[in-house]
Image (cartoon, rainbow, N blue to C red):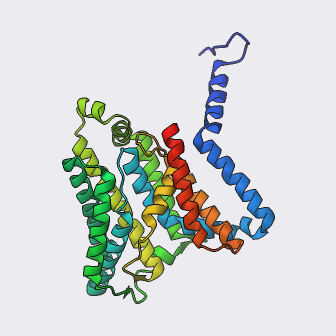
Amino acid sequence: MSTEFDSGGAPVKTFERQNKVWEFLLSQSGFLIAFIIILSIAITMVNRNFIKPQNILNVLGQISIVGIVSVGVGLVLISGDFDISVGSQISLVGAIMAQVLMATQNIFLTIVIVVFLGAALGAVNGVIVSKSKCASFIITLGTRAAYHGLVLVATKGRNFPLQGRFETLGRGKISFIPIPIIVFFLVLLFAFVILRYTRFGRTLYALGGNRTATYLSGVNVDAMKISVYALCGVLVSLAALTLISKLGASYPNTGDGYELEALAAVVVGGTSLWGGKGTALGLFLGVVIFGVMSNALNMMNVSPYFRDVFIGGIIIVAAVLSRLG
């Protein structure tokens, strides 16, 4: 097998490899990695505890729940739609989970019911969005309010402690690594495989890039919408299971704010608000940036209320840059 050379005598494959490296370094993921490194160095210069392995595990543990939710939100956003009902879904799924677990004392049955409930809640969003042809932002804003109302109906505003049951998923460790971190990375791996190697993932990109062309190519657009919303619901239910296990109780406002954090992380990670663009690596980096910033604010004793200001500002900037790009 002969090797092709360019006019300068260098192998063509070497140039292709170098071009791919430079393309990655100049991509949004490359910039995010550089930003995280520079930010981490700056924080470490102020407080050396930041770089300690235990603190790194703390950061990954803190972002694991919102990271799982972000993957679901990111898949929906890549397809060209929004889901801002995920916070209320977490609260509703958590409330049902706690009550079923206390009533049946059967962990396996509880998990099955919760996963199916999450898929059903997501599918409801998908059916309404696909059949009504209304803006997904408005529809999921409505279901967000409806799901929140159902939480209050189901719980009557009460908390439901798990009384020491089902702690392993949220508080357990494998070796020295907390299980929520492992779950988060498994979900990321799942998203990577789906987006890169499956027809479903390619169709998501096509749907977000040009919905009309995707429809004309023979794709059942409605079925795709319902499927991706249902998948988002499953991931949200997994996040709810992990979160309630970690907290040891279900609260009516358990999921409050997760929709904002997830959307911010997804957008910062390079997923376009207009659909058709996004990667699993970008989703991870977006979540990490918020985790690092939150950890830094805590270390510098900055009021946690500034975090919401930061998140809101980042969403605005990222949305503008996404539109300009």
Instruction: Residue at the far bottom: name it.
Output: 163
Residue located farthest toward the left when viewing the structure as drawn = 131
- Relative to 171, 203 lies left or right: left
Q: Is 10 above or below relative to 155?
A: above
Q: Is residue 69 left or right of residue 316?
A: left
Residue nearer the viewer, 44 or 200? 44
Number of numbered discs: 0
Q: In this orientation, which residue lies closer to the viewer: 135 or 34?
A: 135
Q: In the figure, 100 relative to 59: above or below?
A: below
- Give residue 214's quadrant in the image: top left
Pick the front one: 34 or 53: 34
The residue shown at (64%, 63%) is 293
The picture quadrant where one finds residue 162 is bottom left
Q: Residue at x 57, y 52 (%)?
A: 285
Q: Position of residue 242 (x, y in %)?
A: 44, 72
Q: Please report the residue visible at 66 percent of the width from the left and 72 percent of the height from the top.
A: 298
Residue pushed farthest right? 45
Q: Is residue 68 visible?
A: no
Query: Looking at the image, which is closer to me, 270 or 133?
Result: 133
Instruction: Estimate the x, y position of residue 91 in percent, counting from the top left.
Output: 36, 73
Whole-percent x, y for residue 290 in the image: 58, 60
Q: Position of residue 164 (x, y in %)?
A: 43, 88
Looking at the figure, which quarter contains the N terminus? top right
Residue drawn at 21 percent across, 53 percent down: 127
Q: In this view of the protein, can residue 136 be seen by the observer?
A: yes
Q: Is 227 placed above or below 290 here?
A: above
